[in-house]
Amino acid sequence: TAPSDNLHYAAPQETLYQNNQSFTILVADDNRVNLMLARTMISKVLPHSQVLEALNGREAVDQAFAKNPDLIFMDIQMPEMSGYAATRLIRDQEKGKAIPIIALTAGTVKGERERCLEAGMNDYLSKPILLKDVESMLHKHLSTSKKSIHWNFESLRSALGDESTFQQILLLARENLADLQEDLTEDLQTHNSEQIAHTAHSIRGVLLNLGANDLAEEAGKIEQSAKIRQPLSPDQIDGFQRKLRMLGEALQEEVELDL
């Protein structure tokens, strides 16, 4: 791990903005000074959030599975288990696939960014890390967290009036969305605009039935862009697919609660 002075804290006089949402953020770094600085920065940006700490990759994996954080800042070079290995283990578990993981790197090794992305990380920050960098990452990746995705299963439950049918619908919707997401990935890889539009349209229909109207609107935008062969940005696609995975998790949780 780089020395603690690689994290530079330039604190403003007041909280950057008022955010009443409570998120759980995990920071993994074997340097306690770095952990304290990261905690302070996150608390400035998200004063109502819980910040968890891990001193090595193994602790990071254990915390990720036990606490299911909304976002992880992961140092690359740590004892016992590296950030790369920890990320791969987290991604191997279903509930770890959708957690945004931000690499913390020394930024001096050629190809390090590519290695981070290949390991399954969503983004990276090079040290020294500034408050504005932390704020930027939190804004970017928490905007696609589970807490910011809205759906209304209760409307569907009320409309059906039968709990057994409701549970069956949720299971079918989860399976359908998983299949459609795989289809969308394949369509994007083959650059098949017509098929992208068709798949996005199908996804939109499922989302509307589930009351996930905001996400359905995103699917509609992808559909329309594909129809006119307008390029889709990687961030747009990654964010949409991450939200779909989170919705799938929510569907599974809803079914399990009623078993």
Image (cartoon, rainbow, N blue to C red):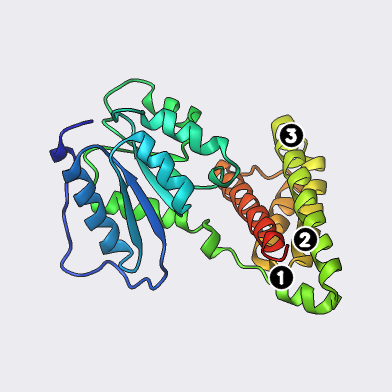
Gap in Å between the C-alphas at discs 1 and 2?
A: 9 Å
Callout 2: SS:
helix
Does the residue at mark 3 contact the one at mark 1 (Cβ under 8 Å)? no
Residue 89 seen anywhere in this rendered image of the structure = yes
Does the residue at mark 1 contact the one at mark 2 (Cβ under 8 Å)? yes
* Residue 170 tag number: 2
Gap in Å between the C-alphas at discs 3 and 1?
A: 29 Å
Quadrant of residue 103 in the image? top left
Residue displayed at 57% across by 47% down: 95
Three-letter code, disc 3: Glu
- Is the N terminus in the top left, top right, bottom left or bottom right quadrant? top left
Question: Closer to the camera: disc 3 or disc 1?
Answer: 1
Three-letter code, disc 2: Leu
According to the picture, the residue beneath numbered tag 1 turns out to be 153
State the count of labels: 3
According to the picture, the residue beneath numbered tag 3 turns out to be 186
Depicted 223 relative to depicted 210: above or below: above
* Image spot of residue 42 (x, y percent): 29, 57
